[in-house]
Image (cartoon, helix red, strand yellow):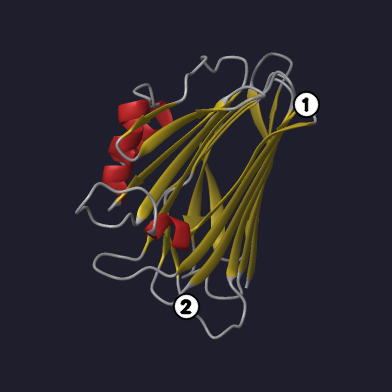
C-alpha cells in the first residue's frame, strides 16, 4: 500500500494562518486541530513490509506549522520482499517555522522499516523536529530498522546522519544495563536556537552542528527512559515535553 500526506501551511496578509492544502490517502488521515496544527491519524494497520508512506510538508514564508500524531505507528511484518518505507520531506521558507513531533515508530519483531527525513530550510526558517523509534513492543524483540536524517539550510548541508537497529542495540549502555531499544532525536535549526556546547549525560548527547543548530540524541531501554535522558541534556523541551503526556 502507498500512503501519502500533503500539508501546505501559509499565512494571510493580516497574519491569519491558512492550510492551503490538507490531503491524505491510504493508511493515514490528517486532521486540523488548531490554527496551525495538524494531527496524523492511522486508518489501517501497518506499515507492512513493502508499504510506502510519504509525508510532504511545506511551510510558506512567514507561516507556522505543527505536526503531531494521535498514536504510535506500528511497523509489522508482511509477505513482501521489501522493507516498508516511511519518508518525510519538509520545505520551510524564509521566516517560517515547522515543529514536527509525530508519535513513536515501533518496529515489531520480524518487521523491516526504512525511515528517511529530509528537511530543506531557507536561511531565516526554523525547525524543531522530534523523531522517536522503538524496537519491539513490550517484551518483544525488535525488527530491522534503518533511519536517515538530512537537513540543508540556505542550500548548505548541515546534517547527514544514519542510524540502524544494529547500532542502536550495540550503542552506549552502562555496565550491566539493558541494551537500548529506544532512540529519540531532536533537531533544532534556525535563528532562535541558542548556542550549545558538545555534552553528554548518561545515554544522551548534545551535538552542535558546524553550520548552526544542534542535534540531540538519547537512548534508553524504553521510550520513557530515552525521553528522560533527553530532558537531562536539554531541559527546555516544549515539543518533547508534550510527548510525555501523550
Asked whether residue 58 appears in the rendered view, the answer is: no
Farthest residue toward the bottom?
A: 79
> Closer to the camera, 12 or 237?
237
> Closer to the camera, 211 or 68?
211
> At numbered mark 1, what does the secondary structure look like: helix, strand or loop?
loop
The residue at which mark 2 appears reads as: 77
Picture coordinates of residue 184, whole percent (x, y):
42, 44
Quadrant in which the N terminus appears: bottom right
Circle 2 Cα neighbour tier, 10 Å, few/some/many (<14 / 14–19 / ≥20)? many
Above or below, 45 against 65 in this view is below
Depth-wise, is mark 2 or mark 1 nearer the camera? 1
Q: Residue at x 43, y 77 (%)?
A: 110
Residue 154 disc label: 1
Q: Distance between the residues labelled 2 and 1?
A: 39 Å
Q: Residue at x 47, y 73 (%)?
A: 111
Q: Which of marks 2 and 1 is nearer the N terminus?
A: 2
State left or right for residue 41 relative to residue 137.
right
Picture coordinates of residue 83, whole percent (x, y):
58, 72
> Closer to the camera, 244 or 164?
164
Farthest residue toward the front?
A: 175
Picture coordinates of residue 180, whole percent (x, y):
33, 54
Q: Do the residues labelled 2 and 1 touch (CB within 8 Å)?
A: no
Above or below, 82 against 37 in this view is below
Above or below, 118 against 43 in this view is above
> At numbered mark 2, what does the secondary structure look like: helix, strand or loop?
loop
Asked whether residue 79 appears in the rendered view, the answer is: yes
Q: Residue at x 31, y 36 (%)?
A: 229
Picture coordinates of residue 131, whole percent (x, y):
48, 45
Circle 1 Cα neighbour tier, 10 Å, few/some/many (<14 / 14–19 / ≥20)? some
Amino acid at each position: 500500500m502507498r500512503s501519502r500526506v500533503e500539508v501546505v501551511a501559509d499565512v494571510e496578509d493580516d497574519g491569519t494562518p491558512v492550510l492551503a492544502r490538507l490531503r491524505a490517502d491510504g493508511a493515514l488521515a490528517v486532521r486540523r486541530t488548531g490554527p496551525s496544527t495538524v494531527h496524523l491519524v492511522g486508518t489501517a494497520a501497518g506499515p507492512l513490509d513493502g508499504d510506502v508512506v510519504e509525508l510532504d510538508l511545506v511551510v510558506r514564508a512567514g507561516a507556522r506549522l505543527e505536526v503531531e500524531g494521535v498514536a504510535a505507528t506500528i511497523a509489522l511484518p508482511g509477505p513482501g520482499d521489501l522493507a516498508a518505507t516511511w519518508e518525510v520531506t519538509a520545505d520551510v521558507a524564509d521566516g517560517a517555522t515547522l515543529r514536527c513531533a509525530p508519535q513513536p515508530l515501533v518496529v515489531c519483531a520480524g518487521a523491516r522499516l526504512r525511515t528517511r527525513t529530509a528537511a530543506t530550510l531557507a536561511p531565516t526558517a526554523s525547525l524543531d523536529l522530534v523523531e522517536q523509534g522503538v524496537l519491539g513492543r513490550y517484551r518483544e524483540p525488535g525488527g530491522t530498522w534503518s533511519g536517515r536524517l538530512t537537513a540543508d539550510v540556505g542550500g548548505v548541508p548541515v546534517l547527514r546522519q544514519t542510524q540502524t537497529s544494529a547500532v542502536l542495540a550495540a550503542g552506549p549502555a552502562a555496565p550491566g544495563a539493558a541494551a537500548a531499544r529506544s532512540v529519540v532525536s531532536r533537531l533544532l535549526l534556525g535563528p532562535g536556537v541558542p548556542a550549545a556546547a558538545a555534552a553528554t549525560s548518561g545515554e544522551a548527547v548534545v551535538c552542535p552542528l558546524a553550520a548552526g543548530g544542534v542535534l540531540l540524541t538519547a537512548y534508553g531501554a524504553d521510550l520513557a527512559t530515552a525521553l528522560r535522558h533527553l530532558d537531562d541534556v536539554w531541559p527546555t523541551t516544549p515539543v518533547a515535553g508534550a510527548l510525555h503526556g501523550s
